[in-house]
Amino acid sequence: MKDNIIKRVLDEAFHIITTGETIRDIAKVYNVSKSTVHKDFSERLKEIDKSLYQQVAKILQHHIKIRHIRGGESTRKKYLNLKSTI
């Protein structure tokens, strides 16, 4: 694996651990696709640092548990904004 990829994967991992942001947010910060970040976390990080991978996996599992809440909240805000513009 190239050094620049290893550095990016580790930077992304430390970023998600410190901020708790979503894959989408991290992709924007590092200017890569969501697919790249997902592959970095699910495949590459496991090869680089197993303990870091486990920490990131816990955060991602938490995001999976609460995604239905986030989606519902986003929909609520969307329709509140539409209602206020009418």
Image (spheres, helix red, strand yellow):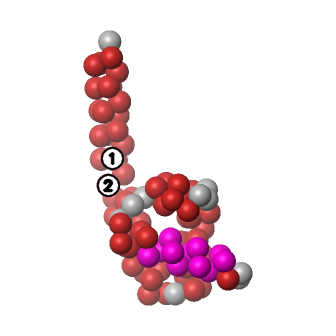
What residue is shown with label 2? Answer: 66
Q: Would you say residue 85 sits in the magenta stretch?
A: no
Where does the magenta region start and end?
4-14
Please provide percent x and percent y for residue 3: 67, 83
Q: Quadrant of residue 84?
A: top left
Please provide percent x and percent y for residue 40: 58, 71
Task: State whether residue 49 is above or below residue 58.
Answer: below
Q: Is residue 10 visible?
A: yes
Please provide percent x and percent y for residue 55: 39, 79
* Most common secondary structure along the magenta stretch: helix
- Residue at coordinates 58% horizontally, 73% vertically from top-left? 8
Tell me if mark 1 has few (under 14), some (14-19) or many (20+) residues whose alpha carbon lies within 10 angstroms of its own. few
Q: Nearer the viewer, residue 54 or 80?
A: 80
Q: Amino acid at mark 2?
A: Ile
Relative to 5, 20 lies left or right: left
Q: Secondary structure at mark 1?
A: helix
- Residue at coordinates 35% horizontally, 30% vertically from top-left? 78
Task: State whether residue 35 is above or below residue 52.
Answer: above
Q: What is the distance, in whole Å, between disc 2 and disc 1 at their CAs?
A: 6 Å
- Residue at coordinates 35% horizontally, 72% vertically from top-left? 18
What residue is shown with label 1? Answer: 70
Residues at circles 2 and 1 in contact by the CB criterion of under 8 Å = yes
